[in-house]
Image: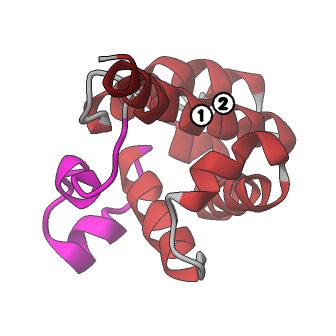
């Protein structure tokens, strides 16, 4: 039997995932390059920190905390009210990838997570264009 961790959850554990989530939201609040992403969120990020942590714990192979609490694990429905085009998706990914680096996530976990995180962010995208791109099209039309 292999003792090599097989999932990001086995590598990071619940505490590591919560550290990642807190780093993500701390970056969103403090880094100017993530200001547009921050504006898409409520003033108080405390509930979102908990929800994302619970979601990621289950998504990364741990206990299904989010599903146990909220039932569904569908990520598209909660994001429907927000304009999420390619730029918004990429802003979220840049912030998450930066959080992975700054939270001392081991390289093997980062390698495991890059593509799946992109797929999740792409699945949440609900507009073909970013807001600024569509505004430009409307303004020039």
Q: Quadrant of residue 81?
A: bottom left
Q: Which mark is residue 91?
A: 1
- Does the magenta run of residues contain 62? yes
39 or 97, which lies in front?
Answer: 39
Please identify the quarter of the rendering in which residue 124 is found: top left
Magenta span includes 44: no
- Magenta highlight range: 60-84
Q: Nearer the viewer, residue 5 or 32?
A: 32
Q: Circle 1: is it few (<14), some (14-19), or many (20+) Cα within 10 Å?
A: some
* Residue 53 sits above or below residue 109 on the image: below
**Residue 61, placed above or below residue 17:** above
Q: Nearer the viewer, mark 1 or mark 2?
A: 1
From where the camera sits, is residue 11 visible?
yes
Q: Residue 35's x, y, as percent?
A: 70, 51
For the C terminus, the image quarter is top left
Q: Residue at x 68, y 39 (%)?
A: 95
Measured Cα–Cα span from mark 1 to mark 2: 5 Å
> Which residue sits at x=40%, y=31%?
135
- Residue 105 x/y as whole percent: 76, 38
Residue 34 location (% of width, % of height): 71, 45
**Crowding near the residue tagged with mark 2, few <14, some 14–19, many ≥20 C-alpha atoms within 10 Å:** some
Q: Is the stretch drawn in magenta largely helix, strand or loop?
A: loop
User: Could you tell me residue 71's position as x and y percent?
Assistant: 14, 70
Secondary structure of residue under mark 2: helix
Residue holding disc 2: 94
**Residue found 54% across the figure and 26% down from its top:** 90
Scheme of image coloration: secondary structure
Left or right, 83 with respect to 105, comes to left
Horizontally, residue 27 falls left or right of residue 18, namely: right
Callout 1 secondary element: helix
Residue at the image point whose x is 25% and y is 50% from the top: 75
Q: Quadrant of residue 63?
A: bottom left
């Amino acid at each position: 039997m292999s003792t090599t961790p097989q999932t990001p959850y086995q590598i990071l554990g619940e505490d590591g995932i919560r550290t990642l989530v807190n780093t993500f939201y701390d970056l969103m609040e403090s880094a100017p390059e993530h200001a547009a992403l921050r504006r898409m969120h409520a003033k108080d990020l405390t509930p979102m920190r908990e929800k994302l942590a619970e979601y990621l714990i289950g998504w990364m192979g741990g206990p299904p905390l989010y599903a146990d609490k909220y039932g569904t694990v569908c990520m598209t429905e909660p994001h429907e009210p927000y304009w999420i085009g390619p730029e918004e998706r990429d802003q979220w990914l840049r912030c998450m990838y930066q959080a992975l680096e700054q939270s001392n996530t081991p390289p093997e976990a980062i390698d495991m997570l890059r593509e799946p995180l992109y797929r999740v962010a792409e699945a949440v995208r609900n507009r073909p264009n970013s807001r600024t791109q569509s505004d430009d099209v409307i303004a020039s039309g």
